[in-house]
Image (tube, grey):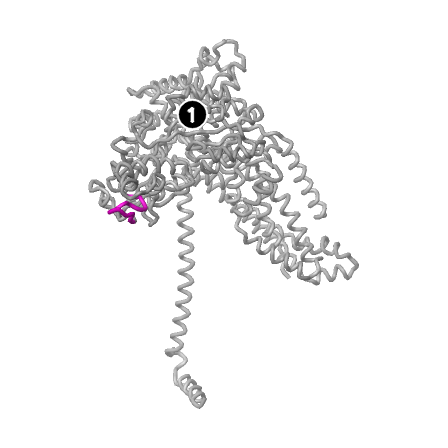
Amino acid sequence: MTDAPATIADASASRSKGSLLEKDARTKKRNAAETRFKAYGIIAIGIGLAFLAALVFSIVRNGVPAFTQTYVTVPITLEAETLDPEGNRDPADISGVMTFAYSPLIQQGLQSALEEADVETDMSASDLTKMLSSSAENTVRQRVVSNPDLIGETEEFRLLASSRVDGYLKGRVERADLERDRNLDAAHLDIVDQLQEAGVVSRTFNMDFILGTDASDNRPEQAGIGASMLGSFFMMLVVLALALPIGVAASIYLEEFAPKNKFTDLIEVNISNLAAVPSIVFGILGLAAFIQFAGLPQSAPLVGGLVLTLMTLPTIIISTRASLKSVPPSIRDAALGVGASPMQAVFHHVLPLAAPGILTGTIIGLAQALGETAPLLLIGMVGFIASNYPEGVASGFLDPNSAMPAQIYEWAKRADPAFYERAWGGIIILLVFLLSMNLLAIILRRRFERRW
Amino acid sequence: MSFAKSTASALAIAAVSATAAAAQSRDNVQVAGSSTVLPYASIVAEAFGENFDYPTPVVESGGSSAGLSRFCEGVGENTIDIANASRAIRDSEVETCASNGVDEIIEVRIGYDGIVFASQIDGPAFDAFTQEQWYNALAAELPQDGEMVSNPNTTWTEVDEALPDVEILTFIPGTRHGTREVFEENVLLVGCEESGAYDTMVNDMGMSEDEAEEACIGVRTDGQSVDIDGDYTETLARIEANPNGVGVFGLSFYENNTDSLKVATMADVEPSTETIASGEYPVSRPLYFYIKKAHLGVIPGLKEYASFFVSDQVAGQGGPLANYGLVPDPELEQTQQKIENETTISQEG
């Protein structure tokens, strides 16, 4: 205790000794500490930005090629004796001819396309068709079945090139890679080069990737994310229709009307806990409750939506309660003071003021649900599923479908590297949706939010 | 707007749509099971949807055991119609099925699949393996001087001088895969017998035959062999990250990734559809799917899908499945007959 006054005296002495313009050692030390701390902060932000940049760079680099696709334009003679053996143009007979019968026609068509482009090759016709997607037969057959008058004519068809030819034009497949590849030879690539010069092979924007359906493992070039986008859309409709009203009703009651006691405390704690439950748990719950117990169909967006509703509810309740809380009590008091009933006070005055916050919370909850894959694994929404477009609204909810993130996961698992590119492309589309939803949330908040 | 009202109406909508779902009969075929069969099944499902007026069947993966257990859950529209499997159904599974009312099952063999051993294309020269080498590299315990000692081999050269001098690091299918069973039987057990370890265990060490077999297929757990529970894509990612790693793949997966993988021969036979069909290549297995007979005639298109799957155009020589890497079954005609007559497992005897 005795030396305390001495220290103060020392300190005042040292302070009085130094000049105002010259920094002493202690000040320098404190300033250095502050500079260091700022530097740490900048480094932390820098690391974060670097990761973000690397992520965006790899997504764009890997995903953008998925938005273009290589096509081969081939004139095909639709021989009547193959496609309509009876010769009576009966639609039933024509649709009875399977895709396999179309292969020889396509082989001939490809050969004549080569002749037109003055490409010489000693490759056999069936080897040549390895350049085309195996979807070619179906493309031709669909057009013939829907338009039987074409039989006997020579028509131009724009057929998908195989994933390896497509990969070559995109720089993914190198000549050296093909040496041990059973599906394509380097000789094919020489032909592709010549055909590209002749304008027979071209790479154009790939609308089918955005609008198409999933394709099987041997034709990645045909796969699209359109059907699973619809699956996601119907799931989000279910989530919105259920989670918003239930969540808002629950939070209004808890916030404005419920008595404060141990029971409501318990409910509150449980809601906060539910928000932290891993989503896969909701998947198991959905499997047990909705499919096994309630007997709803497997792989249906309705079930997916119900599961995601359970997952989104806590998020919506928490954000709704926060925005109800932020409405000042004076608004309620004034409403009650002029004779409004408590319900009128809430619905006429508090709720409209809390609406922007509620909407923001809902949109962010929906965005979260849109990107969720884990619970969908358990209710049968991952696999070769998104291959039919739903017919009408009811079948949109009930027919088997996948969802965008589940489709991306499925593609990333498949053997052909071309699916990998599509998985990245799918990520770009999913991110566009998520970013625009978040942007909407921000705009709504900026425009309608009131501060007191 | 009244939120109470809209809540009530939303619940009503949900209830109505739920009953509508229960009332509506399913018009698409539902398939689940082996991830090895999945590519083949999806190719067939796609072609089926294109050529017939039925919706494209839904094919899920998840592994043979998972698929068969879902298959055996019972009969009805909320259960799957077909289970894909990369191994034959077990007796215990047939019993489980029967106890849940699935007593009539049709077994369909679609063809054969090869299991190949591949490593990074620029990695060490793993060009030729024998079962014996794999057994000595992977066994948990090896017999030595009349005792079982934990596997002392840490590099491939210690196993066999002809092999590269790098650490043993293998990525093999996990126990929930049907492939694991084939790997144990056709590689580890054969290697165990060829190396004489099996005879030593039975004759000199007094083990029973079952105990010896158990010891033969026990895989070391010291980190030099890694079980992969995911798909081959995961194995490929591990190989790409570990230049010295050797992975177990399906033939069709390897053929789609020849730009990053190189394959080794097994017992001097190169894996190819030809050597597998002729039975020369030692590590291959039949692929199956199982049909619930009670669903035939109830689920539209089920029988058509099954017959289409094994038709000559699809599963035969030169068909889309063979192009993807499936080795066609020489006895395809009998399988076609079986579907035509709806012969169940119990009728086959």
Write down the residue under mark 1. A159
Q: Residue visible at 56% across and 46% down?
A: A282
Q: Name the outermost residue toward the bottom.
A: A2
Could you tell me residue B253's position as x and y percent?
36, 34
Start and end of the magenta stretch?
B137-149
Q: Nearer the viewer, residue A280 or B329?
A: B329
- Residue B145 lies in the magenta stretch: yes
Specify the quadrant of the image occupied by residue B162: top left
Q: Chain of mark 1?
A: A
Quadrant position of residue A68: top left
x and y, in percent, of residue B310 in the image: 44, 23
Taking the spot 74% from the left edge, 61% from the top edge, the residue there is: A334
Closest to the observer, A224 or A205: A224
Label tally: 1
Kindly state the secondary structure of the residue where label 1 is placed: strand
Q: Residue furthest right?
A: A339
**Is residue B239 visible to the viewer in this orientation of the structure?**
no
In this view, the residue farthest toward the left is B161
In the rendered image, the residue lying farthest to the top is A87
Would you identify the image quadrant in which residue A22 lies? bottom left
Nearest the camera: A383 or A196? A383
Q: Amino acid at mark 1?
A: Leu
| Vertical relation: A69 (above or below) B1 | above
Vertical order, A374 against A230 (above or below): below
